[in-house]
Structure formats: C-alpha cells, structure tokens
C-alpha cells in the first residue's frame, strides 16, 4: 500500500500482536515500526523482524507525539491484560489506532472508538456505537442503534440485533446471539452459540439456548 | 440500475436506515418520506419533507416516482403489508434494495419492495417474494423460497430447498434445516433451529425448536386481520 499516513507501535508480542501486524501491514494506511511488551516478555528483542522494546522505554524511543499505538494482547475471557495495557498506553499519552477491515461493512453514521479492531465480513449497522478497545471478530453483526461499551470482545459470527446494549468488558464467544433490545450487563461471558433472549446480570457466565446463567461459574476471580 | 426518485413510506428506525442504504449504495434519490396522516407529527424527517400518505399521489406523480415501504415487523408484518398495499393501490411501483455487499446468484428472483442487507447470500434458484426483509448475513439456500411479507433478521439460515410461509417472522440467528418448512404467520425465536415442519400461526423457540403453545397473532398483537 502507498501513502502511509502514520507510524504505529503494536503493544504485545503474541498471537494477537501477530494478527494485528498482518492486518495493519496489508490493509491499513499505517506503517508498523516496532512491537513493545513488558519486561520479561522481550526475548531476543525482535518480533516479526521489527524491534521489540520494553514498555517502560516506549515513550523515550517512540514518543507519543510522533507514533500511534495499538494494544494487541490475548482475547481470552476476560482480557484483564488487554484492559490494563490499554490504560497504561493511554496514560503514557498515546493516541491509539483502530483498524476496520476493508472487507467489513460499516454505515457512515457508525461511531468507533480507539484501539478497536474490526475483522473482515463484520457488519456495523445504522447508528451503531462501538467503544474503545473492542475486538469484533469476522462475520459479527452489530445491529442498528446498538451500543457496545469499552473493552468488549466479540468472537466470529456473533449476531447483536437492533437496539441492544453490551456492557463494558463483555466477552461474547463465536456464534452467540443477542435478541433485539436486550442488554448484556458489564463483564459477562456469553459462551459459544448461546442465545441471549433476556437482559443479563453483570459478571456472570451465560450458556445455552435460551441462555441461562451458570451460577457456579462467576467470571470474577 | 436506473436511478429513480423515490419516496420512503415510514418515519421510524427502518425508514432512517433505509435512507442511508439508498443514499450510499444505490443510484436512487430519496426525495421525501410519507406516513399515515395520524403519524405525521412534523413536517420533516431526516431533513426531508414528510407527506401524509393520503396526499401522496396528489403531490408526487406515480408515473415519475417510485416508493419504498420501510417498516419492521410490527403486528407480525401487518403494518408493512398494509402500507405496501396502500401505496400499490395509489398506483406507485416499489423499488427493492439489494446491498452491493450481498452475494446473489443470477437466477435468483426477488419481488418488489424487498430489502436485502449486506453479507446476505442468496444461492442458486432461491426465490424471494415481495415486501420481504432479509437481514445482515442471512443465507437462503439453493431453491429455497421466502414468501411475501416475511421478515428475516440477521444471520438467519434457510437450508437448501427450505420454505418460509407468508408473513412469518424469523428472529436473529434462527435456522431452518434443508428441506424444512415454516408455515405462514409463524414467529421463530432468536437462535431457534427448525428441524420439523411447523404449523401455521404458532410461536417456536429453542434448539431443536418446539412450539410454545402461543398464538402468533396474540404474541405480536395483530389487530383486525
């Protein structure tokens, strides 16, 4: 791609970082210049042929005024590390990039925050609002006038109907679905294929069709 | 496709997003909205004039304009059907919308006033009636049939040779297995999986889907049908 519009450091040095690297390189205006990770995860200091620098040294080597960041770490439920590192990077003064696949669909009136990643074949419908630090998997649909709060993670082929609210820090696994107008409260985990027909309580795990809370499996440890 | 001057009939959420799709993904020009006089509370909607339905034919020539009725599944699609029939009786032809991000085989047939959203897949020989809504990512298998006035939400799957009877509502992520049939006026809940043919006018939920013993007209408040 020609006409690079900014230089980017990816925070993370695992599978998610590798995935983000490929997408930013091949399908965005950003030039990825380095990776960054916390001390103890630096290995030989090189990842995918680029410098892998310690997060503590990041502002000195790649200052926030000249570089953008993208935090790409594990998507396992719930991604405390992803939330914590995003907060760390923001407090260091970085503007974070978002990525929307050129093969995703988004109406022009959709609002998307920072450090959000939207995979191919996702559909973001009329007036959908997506917060900061949200991962939207391939084929996932966020329905019209639905709102997704910060730090959420959606697997593949998730269907969020119209007028839904997804609370902060939720994890919705592959092929799950939320019926029209339903609210999923903060920090819930929705298991693969679960069908959420009624509003949920916060910090519970839901599975099945219709989805029911698994009282034995609180998501907060 | 020839660009038409069109009037969107409806002033709710469906009308608002239909405007976006027509503006950004068709050669049509939306010039006004229209609604039953009882629902015309302001003179404009989305910065376009709103004309009472009763005055539509007097205000805009049916020969030079087309209509699109944009309503959801209120009263089990009766509101949309009523508006569509009213507009047709006034002499208007209706356009259909087919997303440029949908995959439609060339031998698929689609009636008028139907709306096919992004990432829908209509496989060979599928037939879609008039006044049908197909949501994002919905897949119609080969030779499947969706009759008039149906509403299929996002990520619905109709297997090869499947059939959806007139005015049925299939919610998000529901599925009809290959060769299966949903009778007319049914409500199929979100994520329900239809593995046996249904009876008409019933409500089905779950996987495998079972009738929940409710009448669909009562469930969706159908008045005077």
Image (cartoon, coloured by chain):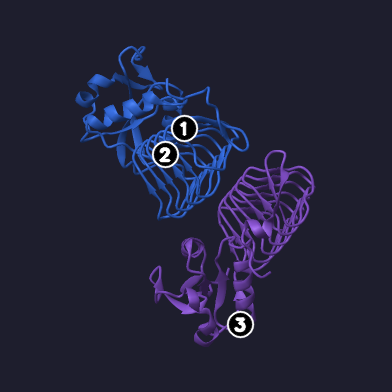
Q: Nearer the viewer, mark 3 or mark 1?
A: 1
**Nearer to the camera, A191 or B3:** A191
Q: Are marks 1 and 2 on the same chain?
A: yes
| Residue at 37% over, 23% down | A81
Mark 1 near mark 2, Cβ–Cβ under 8 Å?
A: yes
The mark found on residue A167 in the picture is 2
Res B94 visible: yes
Q: Give whichever of discs 1 and 2 has the lower sequence position.
A: 2
Residue B108 in the image: x percent, y percent? Answer: 71, 58
**Nearer to the camera, A152 or B201:** B201
- Chain where mark 2 sits: A
Q: CA distance from mark 3 to mark 1?
A: 51 Å
**Nearer to the camera, B56 or B139:** B56
> Which chain is blue in the rendering?
A
Q: Which residue is mark 3?
A: B90
What colour do you see for chain B?
purple
Q: On the rendered image, what quadrant is the C terminus of chain A found in?
A: top left
Q: On the rendered image, what quadrant is the N terminus of chain A found in?
A: top left
């Amino acid at each position: 791609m020609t006409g690079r519009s900014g230089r980017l450091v990816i925070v993370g040095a695992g599978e998610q970082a590798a995935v983000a690297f490929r997408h930013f390189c091949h399908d965005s205006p950003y030039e990825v210049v380095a990776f960054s990770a916390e001390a103890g995860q630096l290995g030989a200091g090189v990842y995918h042929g680029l410098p892998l620098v310690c997060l503590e040294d990041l502002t000195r080597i790649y200052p926030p005024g000249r570089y953008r960041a993208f935090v790409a770490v594990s998507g396992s439920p719930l991604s405390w590390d992803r939330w914590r590192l995003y907060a760390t990077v923001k407090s260091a003064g970085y503007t974070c990039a978002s990525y929307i696949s050129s093969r995703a669909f988004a109406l022009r009136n959709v609002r998307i925050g920072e450090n959000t990643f939207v995979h191919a074949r996702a559909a973001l419908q009329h007036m959908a609002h997506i917060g900061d630090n949200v991962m939207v998997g391939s084929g996932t649909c966020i329905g019209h006038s639905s709102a997704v709060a910060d730090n959420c993670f959606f697997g593949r082929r998730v269907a969020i109907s119209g007028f839904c609210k997804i609370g902060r820090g939720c994890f919705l696994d592959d092929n799950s679905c939320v019926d029209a107008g339903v609210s999923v409260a903060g920090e819930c985990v929705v298991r693969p294929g679960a069908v959420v027909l009624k509003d949920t309580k916060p910090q519970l795990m839901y599975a099945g069709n219709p989805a029911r809370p698994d009282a034995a499996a609180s998501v907060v440890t | 496709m020839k660009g038409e001057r069109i009037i969107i009939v409806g002033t709710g959420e469906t009308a608002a997003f239909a405007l976006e799709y027509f503006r950004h993904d068709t050669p049509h020009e939306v010039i006004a909205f229209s609604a039953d006089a009882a629902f015309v509370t302001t003179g404009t909607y989305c910065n376009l004039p709103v004309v009472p339905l009763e005055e539509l034919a007097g205000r805009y020539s049916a020969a030079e304009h087309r209509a699109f009725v944009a309503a959801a599944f209120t009263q089990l699609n009766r509101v949309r059907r009523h508006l569509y029939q009213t507009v047709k009786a006034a002499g208007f032809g209706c356009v259909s919308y087919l997303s440029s991000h949908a995959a439609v085989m060339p031998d698929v047939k689609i009636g008028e006033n139907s709306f096919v959203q992004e990432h829908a897949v209509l496989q060979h020989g599928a037939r879609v009636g008039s006044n049908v809504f197909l949501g994002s990512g919905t897949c119609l298998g080969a030779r499947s049939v969706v009759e008039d006035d149906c509403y299929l939400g996002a990520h619905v799957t109709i297997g090869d040779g499947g059939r959806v009877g007139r005015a049925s509502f299939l919610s998000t992520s529901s599925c009809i297995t290959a060769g299966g049939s949903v009778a007319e006026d049914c409500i199929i809940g979100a994520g329900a999986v239809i593995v046996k043919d249904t009876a008409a006018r019933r409500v089905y939920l779950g996987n495998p889907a079972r009738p929940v013993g409710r009448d669909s007209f009562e469930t969706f408040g159908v008045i005077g049908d």
